[in-house]
Image (tube, grey):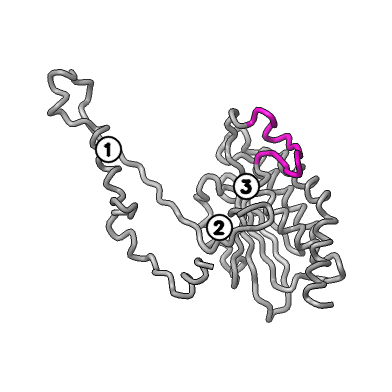
Amino acid sequence: MTTAGADDQLRRRVREFRREFVDHLAEWVRIPSIAGDPDHRDDLPRSANHLAGLCRSAGFPRVEVWQQGDTSAVYAEWRADASAPTALVYSHHDVRAVIGEPWRETTPFAPVERDGRLFGRGASDAKGQVIAHLWGLRALLADGRSSPPVTLRLLVDGEEELGSPNLADLLEAHADDLACDLIVYSDTSLLDAARPAVTTSVRGMIGAELTVLGPAHDVHSGAVSGPSPNPVADLARLISKLHDADGGITLPGFYDAVTTPTPEQRDQYAA
């Protein structure tokens, strides 16, 4: 079969699986795996075990649920020929806390389908992407292939919405299991419904807590507020100095490890 014919057949399989895909996604979205919420502490391992079952049904020979701080991560592995490269798919199954205002038409954890879209907390951040990987694999295997063409490893984080405070320890503890030639991260963007954005890197973040001290009690605005230091004003001045007029970050050493794009990368961005 030609490459074009194989692509058409794969796309046909994907379309055939669409109803099954949406139904399984909706079932998973119903589990309120809210990160950092004590009232939903039990829902995070329940969500992880639900995903582990989906991975097993997709054919992964090795599936494990790993303790990750107060929550659970899911690991799945399907080894190919020793000469094949290894791809690691990273995503997450925890979701953000619910703010009621945007959810007037739909209950967050009772997903509904309207106009070809599934509405529910986590449907696109990022349970939908995880299931898309699994059902893409199932479509690939539907026509007689016994295993994926590469060694496939899947790591699904259980605390991404909290900044993954325990992920570094998890990576260190399972370094051999997670070794790979390529990492695929699908919690990114779509240009439109038919075109995923090609995301080559994402920004990190630095968290800091800063305490600014001022007078121990309120001072009279007319008598001493001028010469008396105002912690709010001091904090505002400090924050304003974090960036220069062009938006550059002014923290000393911040750019020391930042690389300059190569001409090839600039051409790729332009294209």
Magenta: predominant secondary structure element?
Answer: loop
Does residue 144 appear to the left or right of 109 in the view shown? right
Q: Which residues are magenta?
A: 103-121
Are circles 2 and 1 on residues that touch, CB within 8 Å? no
The residue lying at 75 percent from left, 41 percent from top is 115
Q: Which residue is mark 3?
A: 125
The amino acid on which the numbered mark 2 sits, given as a three-letter code, is Leu
Q: Which badge, 1 or 3, is on the more N-terminal residue?
A: 3
Depth check, front residue: 154 or 3: 3
Disc 2 + disc 3, Cβ < 8 Å:
no
Point out the frontmost of discs 2 and 3: 3
Q: Which residue is mark 1?
A: 235
Residue at the spot of label 2: 170
User: Which amino acid type is marked by label 1?
Assistant: Leu
Q: Position of residue 243 (x, y in %)?
A: 31, 50
Seen at 40% across and 51% down, the residue is 206
Q: Are marks 1 and 3 in contact (CB under 8 Å)?
A: no
For mark 3, give the secondary structure.
Answer: loop
> Where does residue 167 sit, x and y in percent of width and height?
53, 55
Secondary-structure class at tag 2: helix
Q: Earlier in the sequence, mark 2 or mark 1?
A: 2
Q: Is residue 211 left or right of residue 167?
A: left
**Alpha carbon separation for disc pair 2 and 1:** 36 Å
Q: Horizontally, is 134 left or right of 102 in the view?
A: right
Residue 151 location in percent, x, y? 69, 71
SS of the residue under disc 1: helix
Amino acid type of the residue tagged 3 in the rendering: Asp
Report the front residue among 151 and 3: 3
Q: Pick the quarter of the image with the C terminus.
A: bottom right
Question: Sequence order check: which comes first, mark 2 or mark 3?
Answer: 3
Quarter occupied by the N terminus: bottom right
* 107 is within the stretch colored magenta: yes
